[in-house]
Image (spheres, helix red, strand yellow):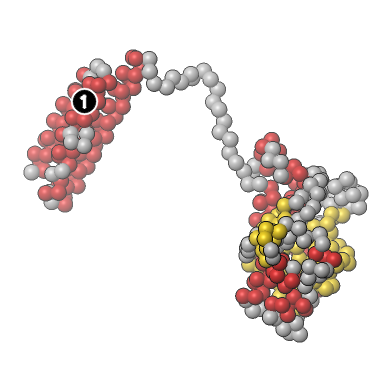
Amino acid sequence: MSSNLLEALGRIEHEGKDAIERASAAEELEKARVEWVGRKGRLTTILRELGGLSPEDRRLVGAEANRVKEVLNAILEGREAALLGNQGGGEQIDLTLPGRARWRGVVHPVTRVVDEICEIFQGLGFARVAGPEVETVEYNFTRLNTPLDHPAADMHDTFYLADGVVLRTHTSPVQARVMEQFKPPVRVIVPGTVYRRDPFDASHAPAFEQLEGLAVDEGITFVDLKATIAEFARRFFGPETRTRFRPSFFPFTEPSAEVDVSCQICNGAGCGACKRTGWMEIMGAGMVDPAVFEAAGYDPERYTGFAFGMGPARIAMQRYRIRDIRMLYENDVRFLEQFEP
């Protein structure tokens, strides 16, 4: 039976090819397509008989049928193109025109910096986590030792979506949520978008990426904080990068410090970006306040830890020597395409 079907396929290939090549108009070509390779065409009739064959014969006849189908379809396409060309139809391609380059997107420099920072801290034992951008006042302020009547809340107490619901002003609420769910030891790195009442100028933006870290365990000291940040700076900016800690205040850490690195734009000589100081602030940091541990259910007599928060946009400015932060948000393709790897 398989030999009969193979002979039939040979006739279909030969006769179908002749019928297609004889077609002199689109209507005749469509009629030939339906007759030979259509759903009720002659080739389909052969395919319907495959079910009655043995597995070996089915493979043999099926392969030949597919080959014949491909041959006839190729002849159909060629004949159709020839008919369209004779009629002056179809898409005309001017081969004298230069090719148009296809624009390809690239990873935004801030996103690239966030990923690289997270990779560095993951290498130091931190896990990357995320949290909601719409937060409650409790997690955004209260659990971080910042009641709304505290002066430190004035700069952040702004973007309310409903009573007791705000756009988060930092990624620290994720730290509170992590401590609520997990017992020490805890080491997390938390990137995400935050919202503040900041002016849109050369070094500030009202919505920006922030990245925070938290480490909690028994026996953690300020020395561990300084060593971790110094190692991060060396890995990210280069082995010659210097760091310095300046006393500061944050309601959820005590003691607290601002962390600077030697300016990467002027190499510490002093420029407009670093306000002629030779240093660029990259983060705030400190030891976690015992009140924050108590709010999370941790024993402050047993556990200590440190936290830090940085703005990846400012760090991107350092890395790529960008003098105005607004360039990162204007979506100017001429600027962004410079960062194509």
| Res. 5 in view | yes
Q: Nearer the viewer, residue 133 or 327?
A: 133
**Quarter of the image where one finds residue 146:** bottom right
Label 1 residue SS: helix
Q: Where is the N terminus found, in terms of image quarters?
A: top left
Q: Residue at (46%, 20%) from the top-left corner?
A: 93
Residue placed furthest toward the bottom = 301
Q: Residue at (83%, 57%) from the top-left corner?
A: 281
**Quarter of the image where one finds residue 336:** top right
Q: Position of residue 307 (x, y in %)?
A: 75, 69
Q: Using the image, determine if residue 284 lies above or below residue 82.
A: below
Q: Which of 77 and 300 is in front in this view?
A: 300
Q: Residue at (81%, 59%) from the top-left corner?
A: 155
Q: Position of residue 137 (x, y in %)?
A: 71, 67
In the image, taking residue 145 as reference, residue 34 lies left or right, namely left
Residue identifier under label 1:
31
